[in-house]
């Protein structure tokens, strides 16, 4: 392998010497440009001509000219050198973490507001890092992080695996989604008491465990007991039922961006004020060079609610 590496460098040096001489049409200036003396420069070009089996330069005591073959080969030599320089630059960027690919898992709800902001941040601050998106529920993200299928997950707490590092990246308020004709539309702000003994489209314990447990805890703390009429796992499906007049639902504020007709949103007072949390998680031993630069994009967003988008 050492011989092959040496041979590759040797060939590139020949090309660089030829291009310098072809562009300068003067061996003295070409040698100075290459930081070498004329005899080694001439020798490199002679070796290249020998390998190719053609004469590339006509040299007299008065002038240096490209042969017809030399003019054609100059175009190819420049292209090869550009490719090698581009490959070297790309390799250095990837090794330093300035470029590369991050595979990102995300929940559907995080795609309403936080994820688009994150991707815009990447486009302006880390344009050489590509992001491959994988929509997954939080439990699937945990498994995918462990197996290396994704590099980073945007998921709901709790994240308790010792193998992971985590960062809280957003929190947001809850809003009530109300159908046409619901008397609570007249209220500027609602409390959880407004849902006591009232029909509610609830989150399913299987498939939306985080939201189910969070709402159950909030209602219990307020001694409010809504009547569950349907249990679903997807927010857009819940809003579709609200639009159909089946009942009300409590959803993250970012879901307002879905713009369902005939669905009215009202803020809901809770304690804490912004109970819906989103975390980034990644395997602490992940050796993807691009990971550090991607995590830097998340840092400014830490502590910002999605409502600030």
Image (spheres, rainbow, N blue to C red):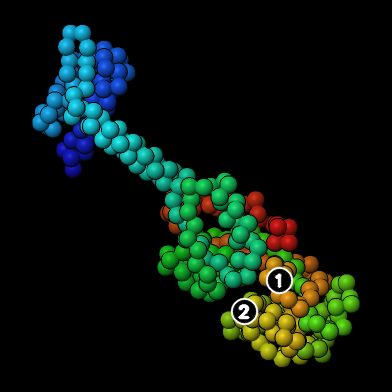
Circle 2 sits in a helix, a strand or a loop, which is it? loop
Q: Name the residue that disc number 2 marks.
A: 234
Q: On screen, 15 above or below 155?
A: above
**Residue 240 vs residue 71, the one in the foreground:** 71
The residue under the point 33% across, 36% down is: 82
Q: Position of residue 240 (x, y in %)?
A: 68, 81
The reply, left or right, for residue 224 in relation to residue 209 is right
Q: In terms of image quadrants, where is residue 258?
A: bottom right
The residue under the point 21% across, 37% down is: 8
**Residue 85 vs residue 205, the one in the foreground:** 85
Q: Mark 2 Cα within 10 Å, few/some/many (few <14, many 20+)?
A: some
Looking at the rendered image, the quarter that the C terminus falls into is: bottom right
Q: Position of residue 5 (x, y in %)?
A: 21, 38
Q: On screen, 266 above or below 23?
A: below
The reply, left or right, for residue 261 in relation to residue 286 is right
CA separation, marks 1 and 2? 15 Å
Q: Position of residue 267 (x, y in %)?
A: 81, 71
Q: On screen, 234 above or below 28?
A: below
Q: Name the residue that disc number 1 marks.
A: 259
Can you tell which mark lies on residue 151? none
Q: In terms of image quadrants, where is residue 154?
A: bottom right
Q: In terms of image quadrants, where is residue 9?
A: top left
Q: Mark 1 Cα within 10 Å, few/some/many (few <14, many 20+)?
A: few
């Amino acid at each position: 392998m050492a011989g092959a590496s040496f041979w590759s460098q040797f060939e590139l040096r020949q090309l660089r010497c030829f291009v310098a001489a072809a562009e300068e049409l003067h061996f003295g200036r070409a040698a100075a440009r290459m930081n070498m003396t004329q005899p080694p420069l001439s020798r490199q070009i002679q070796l290249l001509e020998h390998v190719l089996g053609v004469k590339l330069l006509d040299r007299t005591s008065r002038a240096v000219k490209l042969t017809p073959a030399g003019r054609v080969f100059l175009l190819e030599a420049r292209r090869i050198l550009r490719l090698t320089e581009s490959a070297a630059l790309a390799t250095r960027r990837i090794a330093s973490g300035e470029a590369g690919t991050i595979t990102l898992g995300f929940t559907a709800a995080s795609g309403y507001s936080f994820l688009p902001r994150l991707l815009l941040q990447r486009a302006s601050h880390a344009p050489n890092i590509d992001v491959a998106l994988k929509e997954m529920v939080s439990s699937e993200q945990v498994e995918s992080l462990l197996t290396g299928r994704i590099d980073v997950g945007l998921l709901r707490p709790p994240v308790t695996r010792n193998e992971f590092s985590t960062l809280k990246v957003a929190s947001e308020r809850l809003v009530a989604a109300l159908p046409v004709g619901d008397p609570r539309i007249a209220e500027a702000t609602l409390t959880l008491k407004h849902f006591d003994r009232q029909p509610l489209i609830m989150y399913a314990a299987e498939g939306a465990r985080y939201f189910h447990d969070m709402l159950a805890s909030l209602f219990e703390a307020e001694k409010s007991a809504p009547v569950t009429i349907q249990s679903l796992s997807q927010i857009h499906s819940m809003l579709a039922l609200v639009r159909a007049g089946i009942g009300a639902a409590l959803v993250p504020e970012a879901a307002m961006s879905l713009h369902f007709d005939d669905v009215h949103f009202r803020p809901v007072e809770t304690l804490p004020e912004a109970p819906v949390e989103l975390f980034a998680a990644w395997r602490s031993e992940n050796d993807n060079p691009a990971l550090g630069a991607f995590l830097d994009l998340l840092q400014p967003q830490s502590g910002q609610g999605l409502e600030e988008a």
